[in-house]
Image (spheres, helix red, strand yellow):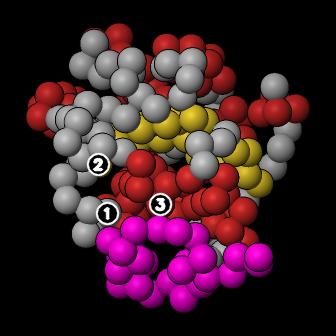
């Protein structure tokens, strides 16, 4: 069966309603390619340019799978810049509009770390951050990643270009082995495939 509509993707009515509110008519190719695999718990590598709908491609499955009653980090999305972290957080917040109890927190440099720590203590399921600030929280033990089930590397090629390879590897090494990983990149240099 050819998947062509959001209705074909077996999503909750809350997500369908949010998608309609956002004016999405039908899924983009990256969404059709990634969502079914992520929903089945598979790891995904997706090649997609900015503006092709990849935030929803990884965001929808995460929102469907996190447990709102469990107030610990379950998903970690790494982005190269704070602008992208903010943008991803805003889009996920819109997609989560009808999902009760899901807390989303962007963490990045240039914003008060105390405010971020306070939000983390209050309980957050989805963290979207730049590698440097995520590492900072891990060092301070204000972000514990043992409960992470989903990791997304968004614009992985840009993170490598910006010199975040070691941070990315350290973060991944500290999350559980049996997590689900999704990697999105506009280009696929060898370092990313490694």
Answer few, some or many: residues within 10 Å of disc 1's Cα (few below 14, many 20 plus, some between 14 and 19): many
Check the image and report above or below for 110 versus 68: above
Query: Where residue 96 is drawn, which disc sits there?
Result: 1
The residue singled out by tag 2 in the image is: 104
Q: Which residue is at the front of the view, 51 or 151?
A: 151
Residue at image x 69%, y 32%? 160
Answer few, some or many: residues within 10 Å of disc 2's Cα (few below 14, many 20 plus, some between 14 and 19): many
Magenta span contains residue 10? yes
Check the image and report above or below for 47 versus 14: above
Dots 1, 2 in contact, CB < 8 A: yes
Dots 2, 3 in contact, CB < 8 A: no
Dots 3, 1 in contact, CB < 8 A: no
Q: Based on the displayed image, in which of its 4 quarters is residue 29 positioned?
A: bottom right
Residue at image x 25%, y 69%? 98
The range drawn in magenta is 1-26
Residue at image x 42%, y 38%? 75
Q: Based on the displayed image, in which of its 4 quarters is residue 57 positioned?
A: bottom right
Query: N-terminal of the two: label 1 or label 2?
Result: 1
């Amino acid at each position: 069966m050819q998947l062509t509509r959001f209705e074909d993707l077996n999503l909750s009515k809350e997500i369908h309603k949010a998608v309609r509110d956002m004016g999405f008519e039908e899924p983009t190719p990256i969404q059709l390619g990634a969502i079914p695999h992520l929903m089945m718990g598979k790891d995904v590598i997706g090649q997609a340019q900015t503006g092709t709908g990849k935030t929803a491609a990884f965001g929808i499955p995460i929102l469907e799978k996190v447990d709102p009653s469990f107030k610990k980090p379950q998903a970690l999305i790494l982005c190269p810049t704070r602008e992208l972290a903010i943008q991803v957080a805003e889009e996920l917040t819109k997609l989560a509009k009808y999902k009760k109890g899901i807390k989303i927190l962007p963490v990045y440099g240039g914003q008060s770390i105390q405010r971020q720590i306070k939000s983390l203590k209050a309980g957050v399921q989805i963290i979207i951050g730049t590698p440097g600030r995520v590492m900072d929280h891990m060092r301070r033990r204000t972000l514990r990643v043992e409960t992470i089930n989903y990791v997304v590397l968004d614009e992985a090629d840009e993170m490598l270009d910006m010199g975040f390879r070691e941070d990315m590897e350290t973060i991944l090494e500290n999350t559980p082995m049996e997590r689900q990983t999704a990697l999105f990149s506009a280009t696929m240099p060898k370092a990313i495939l490694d």
